[in-house]
Image: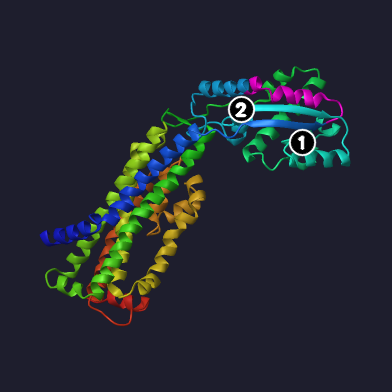
């Protein structure tokens, strides 16, 4: 046992105490955190250039120009901004953007967040003509206009409710090249609001009341769980919750393959340099392989702990810690160890059988194809964790841990509770079997040089006593 622990510590220390490892594993989350903080600070303080200039509106009645003046009035924009802030407070969401929910791009540009000062003069023209369009475009090129909207009567007339999609009449909007792209969306929205104002006025409705009635209220959606608890299923929360399963799977994937790949490469390097022969003079092949697997397992565990802590801290900071339960973390470590020992056994066996990384990649490719399946099918598996595909791959090694963490971290979870202990027991039984088979290959392969073995030769090695 002491020899095994010495080997494990040797593998662990030679990997973890390198500056490159510390920079890659610890430096990356710190760099991400610093970058996110920097972006939040910069975005919070950044204000785009002011929107100042003249917009020409070509419409025969003059009603639209009057409505546009009301929409582009700075006081009206400020009222819209305050109204949306109040809506967010009432819904219990204080973040303007991001977080669990918040204002999307359309709402953000409509209320004028970050647009700076808005001073727009509306210029009205009665009739559209080719000469007028040429003149307006020339003025935009000279910087005299920031935009020009050409709106036909059929656009202002209340649309037929039976019309759908592209059948609705459209208006033309010309934007000067100097206008910021975000300002373009802002202008589009306010002219659209002005058109709605005119339609409301023609229907003898108060424009502000009509616009208020058309605003879709924000919902506070709660899902009632069988145990009586409630979970947030509002739009932003749903999107974030859908990402949790794939984040868990990628965390296992990254930590397992980082450490297992390094295990294979060090095994190949020691075999090529004949260091393996010196080590085998002091320990048995099984002790050497087991020690190397345990040592690199510690490396993988450290990666999981660092990134799990970073992820949980981020969720708590954004008031979304409830999306991850204690059992989710427990299952994360259960399936991490299962995944690691499965992949590490394969990597150790392959590393002992070859003398070159290119030869190793040829033998590892079939296994990688199986493990890639959860990555390819993560969306259907996490959205239907009790479907046939998810259930079938829950029993196929080495995909078991990756598929099961997707299923367990999904909102719906695993409906048939018996599948959880059964897949765990079956998975760890496969781990023992794979380590036993890997040990037989390792014992023969570490002292074999020359031409790399074929898959059939590897099967022959398994029959050696």
Gap between marks 1 and 2, in whole Å? Answer: 20 Å
Q: Residues within 10 Å of mark 2 (few under 14, many from 20)?
A: some
In the picture as drawn, the residue positioned furthest to the front comes out as 142
Determine the image quadrant of residue 106.
top right
Q: Judge whether residue 291 can be spotted in this image.
A: yes
Relative to the observer, which residue lies in front, 240 or 79? Answer: 79
Q: Is residue 276 magenta?
A: no
Judging from the image, what secondary structure is the residue with disc 1 in?
A: strand
Which of the image's four quarters has the N terminus? Answer: bottom left
Bounds of the magenta span? 59-77
Q: Is residue 67 left or right of residue 9?
A: right
Residue displayed at 35% across by 58% down: 257
Residue 326 in the image: state x and y as whole percent. Answer: 33, 37
Which numbered dot is residue 117?
A: 2
Residue 33 in the image: state x and y as whole percent. Answer: 38, 41
Which residue lies under the disc numbered 1? Answer: 148
Q: Judge whether residue 427 can be spotted in this image.
A: no
Residue displayed at 26% across by 71% down: 269
Q: Is residue 243 left or right of residue 292?
A: right
> How many marks on residues?
2
20 in relation to 203, above or below: below
Q: Is residue 74 magenta?
A: yes
Residue 394 in the image: state x and y as whole percent. Answer: 41, 53
Magenta region, main secondary structure: helix
């Amino acid at each position: 046992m002491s020899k095994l622990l010495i080997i494990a510590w040797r593998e662990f220390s030679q990997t973890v105490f390198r500056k490159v490892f510390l920079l890659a594993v610890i430096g990356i989350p710190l760099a991400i955190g610093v970058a996110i903080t920097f972006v939040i600070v910069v975005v919070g303080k950044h204000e785009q250039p002011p929107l100042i200039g003249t917009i020409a509106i070509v419409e025969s009645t003059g009603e639209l120009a009057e409505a546009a003046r009301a929409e582009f009035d700075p006081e009206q924009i400020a009222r819209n901004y305050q109204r949306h802030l109040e809506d967010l407070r009432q819904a219990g969401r204080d973040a303007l953007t991001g977080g669990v929910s918040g204002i999307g791009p359309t709402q953000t540009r409509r209320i004028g967040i970050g647009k700076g000062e808005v001073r727009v003069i509306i210029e009205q023209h009665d009739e559209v003509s080719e000469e007028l369009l040429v003149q307006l475009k020339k003025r935009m090129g000279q910087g005299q206009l920031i935009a020009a909207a050409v709106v036909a009567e059929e656009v202002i007339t209340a649309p037929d409710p039976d019309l759908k999609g592209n059948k609705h009449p459209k208006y033309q909007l010309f934007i000067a090249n100097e206008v910021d792209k975000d300002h373009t969306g802002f202008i589009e929205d306010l002219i659209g609001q002005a058109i709605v104002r005119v339609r409301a006025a023609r229907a003898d409705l108060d424009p502000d009341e009509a616009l208020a009635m058309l605003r879709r209220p924000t919902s506070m959606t709660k899902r009632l769980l069988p145990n009586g608890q409630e979970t947030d299923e509002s739009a932003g929360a749903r999107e974030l919750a859908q990402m949790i399963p794939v984040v868990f799977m990628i965390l296992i994937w990254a930590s397992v393959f980082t450490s297992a790949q390094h295990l294979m490469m060090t095994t190949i390097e020691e075999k090529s340099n004949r260091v393996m022969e010196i080590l085998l003079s002091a320990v048995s092949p099984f002790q050497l392989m087991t020690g190397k697997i345990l040592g690199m397992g510690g490396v993988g565990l450290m990666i999981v702990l660092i990134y799990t802590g970073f992820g949980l801290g981020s969720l708590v900071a954004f008031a979304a810690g409830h999306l991850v339960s204690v059992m989710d973390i427990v299952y994360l470590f259960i399936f991490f160890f299962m995944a690691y020992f499965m992949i590490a056994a394969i990597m150790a066996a392959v590393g002992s059988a070859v003398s070159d990384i290119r030869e190793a990649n040829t033998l590892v490719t079939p296994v990688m194809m199986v493990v890639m399946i959860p990555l390819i099918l993560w969306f259907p598996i996490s959205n239907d964790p009790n479907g046939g595909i998810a259930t079938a791959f829950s029993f196929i090694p080495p995909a078991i841990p990756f598929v099961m963490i997707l299923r367990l971290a999904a909102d719906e979870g695993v409906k048939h509770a018996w599948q959880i202990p059964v897949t765990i027991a079956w998975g760890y039984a496969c781990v023992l079997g794979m380590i036993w088979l890997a040990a037989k290959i390792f014992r023969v392969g570490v002292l074999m040089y020359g031409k790399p073995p074929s898959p059939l030769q590897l099967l022959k090695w398994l029959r050696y006593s």
